[in-house]
Image (tube, grey):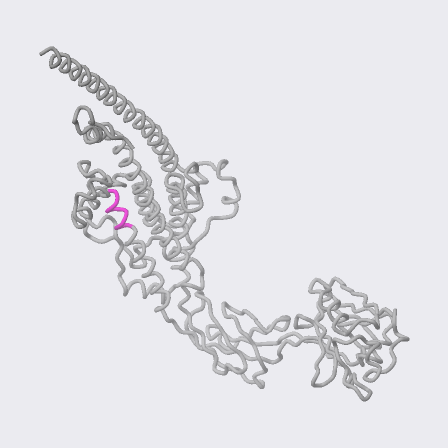
């Protein structure tokens, strides 16, 4: 604690505070610069969040299914259900299920439990004599299970009977193998089931004059006598057999009899068959419902307009240089409302004429208005009813002609999808970016749909902004404004040390003054004493 002015009567503390206020002015400017950089960093990050929202909105119309306006309805959904893609024309089609694909399976011929107790899959075999009898004689026996995969390649697993293990242990080895067979136990029927994981007919082998798809080999005594699973009890899987008629081709019928799956695609329609239709054709009605696709495109346009407005405001806001950020002392002298109004002026124009934002604004407009090379009937966004507003002051906002857009979605949703989401040829995109010629880059741009272009532009801009303003995952050393903050903090620390030295010097100077005044007072008192003594 320092107390000045005892000898001189001067308010030393007040004088030094006033002197230090003058000395602190450069430090206040450092703090104001730091606040401005932090505000600018936050403004960039807010803009990045808005750009990310637009990118997500664009991705919502990226998938072909997102713009599919076709609705397919089965006349008998207990027998089959159906969906149609965007290429299917509206109309009534005919579909018949002659045979449903089934899995090959082999089930115990009888209940496993043959004694007074009920068999348990979790107990050891040699602890269940009361259920399955003495199985010690089978210990060490090996049997094999062989199948053929969809490529006709044989797969085989060898199972060693270990009577000190449980049925669960044995079934796990089967299920974990690559033979494509699932083994399980049905407690209600007390039987084991071995079935192929995939439905349909696969290559097999002839066993006792019959073609079998799950083939047993080796020592099958345990399999036959204990688990009651026998080769001759196999129920072989079959392929689905269906027929399809398109009214455009009259009574001409397409027959599909090679599908192992009960999900079958014909002519742009995907059928999930459940049971035979009893020899009769059932109808499939395909119609258009543009609501969902229209709403997704409208949501994208709304999001685009919002970010366009935000960017236009940000790069054109006026900059009020006479309103720097308030210092703590200045803020205490203002009312809350006055401080808010000051801050509003101080934060204005932080991104004025920003080159990154100006560039993304220009590039997004170019992305939308450059024609797309597609095989469909649409190659420009205006052809589907999306154009810029007539008022140039809007800064490139989009507006939708609902009638025109709905008509495009209803008549040719596939062409709409191509316009928005076409991708460039792999012959071009597989060329490394740094090795592409100017012609290749132009061709990639031409073949890429509007959404793909926008997403690429947005992501590039987001990365540029992250390089300048960082994000929550980056330290200050990893982005431009962060490094500027580090520099300002260093200048603040250095200047604060300098201020401490200046304040110390002032106190030393005033202390010497006080000492001189005190010495002068002492001399004066001594002289006065001598004069008074001589009288």
Task: Name the one closer to the observer, 196 or 407.
Answer: 196
Q: Residue at x 51, y 77 (%)?
A: 81
For the view shown, which residue lies furthest in the right direction?
A: 137
Where is residue 415? Give x, y as percent.
40, 59
Q: Is residue 463 above or below residue 92?
A: above
Q: Residue at x 38, y 37 (%)?
A: 482
Q: Which residues are magenta?
A: 308-315
Task: Name the one closer to the observer, 216 or 279.
Answer: 216
Magenta stretch, main secondary structure, is: helix
Q: Is residue 253 left or right of residue 379?
A: right
Q: Quarter of the image for the C terminus: give it.
A: top left
Residue 217 figure quarter: bottom right
For the view shown, which residue lies furthest in the bottom direction?
A: 116
Q: Is residue 135 left or right of residue 366?
A: right
Where is residue 264? Give x, y as percent.
56, 71
Q: Residue at x 64, y 71 (%)?
A: 260
Residue 17 figure quarter: top left
Q: Quarter of the image for the N terminus: give it.
A: top left
The question of residue 312 being in magenta is answered with yes
Q: Residue at x 84, y 70 (%)?
A: 162
For the view shown, which residue lies furthest in the left direction?
A: 535
Where is residue 276? Give x, y as percent.
59, 82
Q: Is residue 38 above or below residue 448?
A: above
Query: Number of numbered discs present?
Result: 0
Q: Is residue 348 left or right of residue 460?
A: left
Where is residue 398? Give x, y as percent.
27, 54
Q: Is residue 503 above or below residue 282?
A: above
For the view shown, which residue lies furthest in the top direction?
A: 534
Task: Name the one closer to the observer, 333 or 386.
Answer: 333
The question of residue 190 being in magenta is answered with no
């Amino acid at each position: 604690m320092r107390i000045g002015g005892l000898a001189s009567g001067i308010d030393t503390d007040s004088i030094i505070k006033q002197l230090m206020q003058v000395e602190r002015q450069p430090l206040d400017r450092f703090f104001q610069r730091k606040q401005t950089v932090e505000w600018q960093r936050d403004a960039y990050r807010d803009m990045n969040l808005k750009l990310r929202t637009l990118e997500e909105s664009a991705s919502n119309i990226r998938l072909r299914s997102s713009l599919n306006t076709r609705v397919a309805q089965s006349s008998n959904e207990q027998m089959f259900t159906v969906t149609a893609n965007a290429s299917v024309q509206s109309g009534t089609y005919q579909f018949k299920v002659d045979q449903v694909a089934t899995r090959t399976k082999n089930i115990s011929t009888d209940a496993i439990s043959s004694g007074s107790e009920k068999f348990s899959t979790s107990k050891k075999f040699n602890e269940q004599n009361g259920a399955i009898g003495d199985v010690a004689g089978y210990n060490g026996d090996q049997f094999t299970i062989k199948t053929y995969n969809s490529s006709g390649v044989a797969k085989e697993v060898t199972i060693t009977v270990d009577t000190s293990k449980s049925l669960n242990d044995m079934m796990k080895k089967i299920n974990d193998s690559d033979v494509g067979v699932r083994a399980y136990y049905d407690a209600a029927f007390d039987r084991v089931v071995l079935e192929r994981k995939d439905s349909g007919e696969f290559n097999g082998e002839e066993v006792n004059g019959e073609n079998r798809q799950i083939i047993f080999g080796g020592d099958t005594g345990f399999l036959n006598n204990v688990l009651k699973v026998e080769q001759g009890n196999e129920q072989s899987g079959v392929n689905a057999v269906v027929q399809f008629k398109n009214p455009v081709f009259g009574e001409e019928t397409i027959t599909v009899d090679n599908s192992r799956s009960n999900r079958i695609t014909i002519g742009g329609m995907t059928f999930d068959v459940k049971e035979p239709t009893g020899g009769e054709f059932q109808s499939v009605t395909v119609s258009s419902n543009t609501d969902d696709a229209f709403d997704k495109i409208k949501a994208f346009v709304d999001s685009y307009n919002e970010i366009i407005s935000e960017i236009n405001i940000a790069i054109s806001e006026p900059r009020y240089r006479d309103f720097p950020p308030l210092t703590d002392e200045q803020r205490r002298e203002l009312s809350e409302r006055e401080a808010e109004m000051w801050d509003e002026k101080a934060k204005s124009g932080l991104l004025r004429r920003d080159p990154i934002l100006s560039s993304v604004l220009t590039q997004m407009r170019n992305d939308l208005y450059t024609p797309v090379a597609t095989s469909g009937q649409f190659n420009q966004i205006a052809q589907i009813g999306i154009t810029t507003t007539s008022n140039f002051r809007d800064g490139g906002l989009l507006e939708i002609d609902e009638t025109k857009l709905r008509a495009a979605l209803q008549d040719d949703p596939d062409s709409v999808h191509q316009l928005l989401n076409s991708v460039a040829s792999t012959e071009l995109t597989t060329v490394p970016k740094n090795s592409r010629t100017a012609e290749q880059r132009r061709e990639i741009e031409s073949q890429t749909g509007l959404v793909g272009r926008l997403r690429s532009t947005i992501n590039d801009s987001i990365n540029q902004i992250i390089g300048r303003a960082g994000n929550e995952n980056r330290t200050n050393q990893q982005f431009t404004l962060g490094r500027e903050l580090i520099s300002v903090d260093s200048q603040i620390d250095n200047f604060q040390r300098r201020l401490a030295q200046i304040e110390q010097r002032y106190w030393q100077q005033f202390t010497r003054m006080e000492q001189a005044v005190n010495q002068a007072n002492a001399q004066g008192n001594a002289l006065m004493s001598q004069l008074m003594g001589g009288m």
